[in-house]
Structures are given as C-alpha cells and as structure tokens.
Image (cartoon, helix red, strand yellow):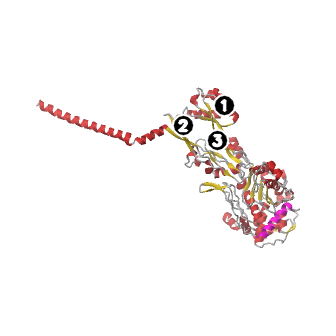
Amino acid sequence: MIINRDNDRARVFNRRAAVLGGGQALMISALVGRMYFLQVVEADRYRMLAEENRINLRLLPPPRGRILDRFGEPLAVNRQNFRVLIVSEQTRDLQATLDALAEVIGLSEYERERVVKEVSRRRSFVPVTVRENLDWEEMVRIQVNAPDLPGVIVNEGLTRFYPQTETAAHVLGYVSSVDEEDLTGDPLLQLPGFRIGKQGMEREFDLVLRGSGGNSQVEVNALGRVIRELERKEAEAGTDLSLTLDERLQRFTAERLGAKSAASVVIDVHTGEVLVMASTPSFDPNVFNRGLTQREWNALSGDPRAPMTNKTISGQYSPGSTYKMVVALAALEHGAIGIDQTVFCRGYTDLGSRRFHCWEGLGHGNMDMVQSIAQSCDVYFYEVARRVGVDRIADMANRLGLGHSSGLGLAGERDGLIPTEAWKRATLGKSWQKGETFNTAIGQGYVLTTPIQLAVMAARLSTGLAVEPVITRQIMLDGAVVQRPPKAFASLAIDPTHLEVARRGMFEVLNGPRGTAHASKLKSKDTKMSGKTGTTQVRRITMAQRDAGLPKGDEIPWNERTHALFVAFAPDDNPRYALSVVVEHGGGGAAVAAPIARDIMTEVLRLDPSRKPRINEDQVAETAPSAPG
C-alpha cells in the first residue's frame, strides 16, 4: 500500500517536472528566438538607431543673396556679425563673469537678466548669446580681456546690412525674425535667429534670396555634448537680385525731398524701368534686423508723416490739374471740343446755385486747349468735362495707367480710383451729379491716383505707348532667375495729333511765358522739359470761408494744407525719362513740387543712366556735353 502511494507521488512529480522543464524550454526557445530576431534580423535597424543617437545632423543657414542696383552697387548685403557668447560650465561664478564683461562692453540690466534666464533653461555646456552685432572695437576689447572672462567666447556669423540705410528702404523692405504664421515646413525657418523678408523686395523675392541650407554631422556623447565634426556640406547662397534703380539718383532724390512727407518716381519711357522710387520720410531697415526697441517703434508708428508707408505705391492723392491732359484727350477723341476752339474764363462758372471757381480769380479770358493746359485754367476744363462726360474721361484715364495697379507686384500697392456713374451707383447707391463732373475735370472729387501711376501717365503721354513699369532686371522662369527680356509696348490707340496738343500744352507749362511752372524750366539751352503742375485741396472751402478770407502759409495747420504735385518728361524733343513728384500738404504745385522735379530731372539727364554705364562722378561732370545746370 505504501509502495503504491510512493509510486503515485513519483509519477506526479515526474509529470510536474516534465511540464516545468517543457515550460522552461519553451521560454528559453522564445528568448533565444527573440535575441536572434533582435541581433540578426533587426541588426541593421538598431545599428542605425544607435548611430543616430551618436551622430547629430545640424542644419547650416545659407548666406542671403544680395540686392544690387542697375550698375551692381550693393543695396542689401551680408556683413560679419560678431556675437559674444557665454558657456556657464566654463565659469565658476556667472554673475562675476557678467560683471567683468559689463566693464568691457557695457551690459544693461535687461541683458543680464535674459542671459541668467537662458543659462538656467539650458545645459551647462550650451553657449548662450549675450549680445549680437558687436562692432570691431568691442570684439577686440573682449579678445584682449579674454583671460579675465572665463567662459566668454566670440563667435562670427553673417547678418543683413543695408549700406544706404534709409535711401531705398521702402523698395528693399527689411528682414526680421520668423513669426509663427511664417512657418511653411522649411527647416531653415526653425533655426534660432534666422531672418526672412518682411517687406518690399526682401519679401517678394524671399525664396530666391534665401538660398539652400547645408548640414554638419557631429559626434555627440550621451548628454549631447559635441565631441567632433565628422562631415560638413556647405550651404548654397541665395541668388543675387538686380534692380532697375540707380542708387545715385535714388539717393539724390531722397535728399532733395528732405524731411517732407513726399514721393517721387522716375521711369525710363523706352523700357519701363523704374530708376527712382523715393518715399520720405523713410526708416533705417537695419534696426529691424537687430530688433526695434519700444521707443523706436513708437517713434515710427506715431509719426503723422507715415515713414513706414511706401507713398510711391500706397499713397493715394487727388491728381489735381495733372489730370487735365486726361480730360483734354477724352474731349478731343469724342469731338467735344476742337483743338483751336476757345472758352471764355471770367474766374468762375455757375451750375445752378453753386459757383465753381478758377484758381485765377480775375479769370484768364479766352482760352484754347494748349493755353488752358499751360495756364491751368479750371473754367475751360469745367466746360470741356461737361460736354464729354465723366465715363469717357474715366476710359481715357484708365488707358493712361490711372485707377489700377501698375503691375510692379509689390505688396501694399493701391489701385487709386477713377470714378464713373456706374461706380457711384454701385458703391454709394446714388446718382452722379453734374457738379461732380466739374470736380473730376480738375482732378479732385473722388479721383485718386498714386505717384507711380502719375509717372506712368507721363511716360505714356510722351510716347503714345502703354508703358509698363518694371523694378527688377531679372524674372523667375521655371524656378530659375534669368535676365528680363526687353518688351515692346502696345499703342494706346490715341490720335497722334491729339497727343501732340497735350504735349504742347505741357511744354508751355515750363517754357511758355505764362506757364504755371515757367520759373522751374531746365536751365539748359539745349534740353527742354515738359510738365504739368497740380495743387489739390484736402478739405472743402465754403463760400462763407472764401468771403471771410482764407488763412495763408503757416497760419494753416499742416494737415489742412494743399498737396503739391508735378508730372514731367524730358527731353521734350526725344523723351527718355518721365517723373512724378507729390509733396503732401506742401502747398502749390508750381511753388513746391515743380522746383523739386526740375532738380531731379536735371540730375537724371546729367547721369543719363539708361544710355551709358556708370562711371565715377568726376568723369560724368567732365564728359557730359551741354548738361543742364
């Protein structure tokens, strides 16, 4: 009995031992299989993961492409940027090191607080930027005092720099830090301190100027500390961009406009190339690269003269009497008046109960079309506009480049406004009134234009062709930058005899004895300029105010003074250049805008940038034949 019980125990034990052994064998088999899978089948994958943990791939920012003027003069370049950094693990006392550094280059309390905060957030071996854009003297002082500045190092990089500062800021724009809305998936945008174009050409051609990033493979330890660089592929610099501007003329025009709130555009009428695009006051785009202080931003944004606005494309102004050639051509085309037919000006004309005045209070007497342009007779154009109608005037204005974008492609450009009867019904829900036609006749009322449009109008009047302005000498074609091919402009389909009448009137404005801008004609005996003055009110003057006597000069608040305008082309016998000048609240077109236009055109003709390569100023002065003074 006892023997049977022992046998039963032995059998149970053997069975349990067998089960346990089988389980162990199964587990060992699974473990061996898993080890085989990991070490043999997945060996390449885990080798790659281990390699990635050991080797970091770091993106290298590319040098930004330069922006040049038509002769290769730099407008936007890259220059050395010396940065002072501090590595906290290499200094025993961070505050003491910052105190010593402050003795060398001076540190604000804000800079010190920022550095301490950054050090606390990063690993001790990671460099923290103390200051960028050190000048040469500051960099040298740090290097000389290096033994007393443990953990302080000087690093060198590139930063955007605009050597002409304010001269072409509105055209070039500026670069600044990447905002969240700028992120497109490009890894370059994730780099600390990377800059992208935010306005002007920097923005429009940002991808071309940006270039392609390089990379550096570095070996790191488990903490991420760099041990050595294994491989390096340099970044590909951005493409240089060539503009049509002439830096010399741009600078001269900006200086001539001075501190006025003003704008001027100069165009080559044969090619449409914009030689000058000046807006004043301006700003220094370099400050946006380093970062504006609150005080600097408040000064810019609070200035009533709007230094951040590119007035050449965004400023909208009533064209005043510069619009009278539009009215004249529309009237001639539709037979509303003959070339030699006269209108009597007695200083005003009545329409119902309203009286519309001429600027010449005593009247001009009998006026034909040429003299009405030359002497800017308002009464003549009231009558002509009444006969031809606002819709036909609008059609001619559109053909001359007014009321729509110039096609330059710059962000912020505005269309202006050329009113029609249908426009008023659709926009204001009211019918057009005859008095509004009178206001339109002298370029006021609803009419709005931009300085670039006025320069295009002058170019088209001088050639009879649909001149289209361009600002770059290069274009994008299939992803590559190529030279812009010359373009043949279409005809405006305006009768040449009608254009000649308008040109004769503009010639008389400057060169006739009674022209409104006779005092601003070119001083050269051989070269003549044709043009047209304009003066526009910015507030309505009632009859009671007129009878009571209007304040003059400095008695009028700046923002209530009239705008001064002038458009012109030269040489008169073979036009090559057209320009516009607008001075906000500057006063009279003849007294203020015309002299500025004369000086700018004189310099344009002296340098003649579309016909000869750039040479030094002394050579120009010596070789320019019969240059206007």
Q: Main secondary structure of the magenta part?
A: helix
Q: Nearer the viewer, mark 3 or mark 2?
A: 2
Q: Provide the residue span drawn in magenta.
A: 495-511
Which label's residue is closer to the chain start, 2 or 1? 1
Q: Quadrant of residue 38?
A: top left
Mark 2 — residue? 229
Tell me the kind of residue under disc 3: Leu
Percent position of residue 313, x then y: 71, 55
Percent position of residue 37, x then y: 36, 41
Q: Quadrant of residue 295?
A: top right
Q: Residues within 10 Å of mark 2 (few under 14, many from 20)?
A: some
Tell me the kind of residue under disc 2: Glu
Point out which mark residue 142 bears.
Answer: 1
| Image position of 137 (left or right of 153) | right
Report the Cα–Cα distance between label 2 and label 1: 27 Å
Report the Cα–Cα distance between label 1 and label 3: 19 Å
The residue lying at 72 percent from left, 51 percent from top is 71
Percent position of residue 510, x then y: 84, 60
Tell me the kind of residue under disc 1: Ile
Which label's residue is closer to the chain start, 3 or 2? 3
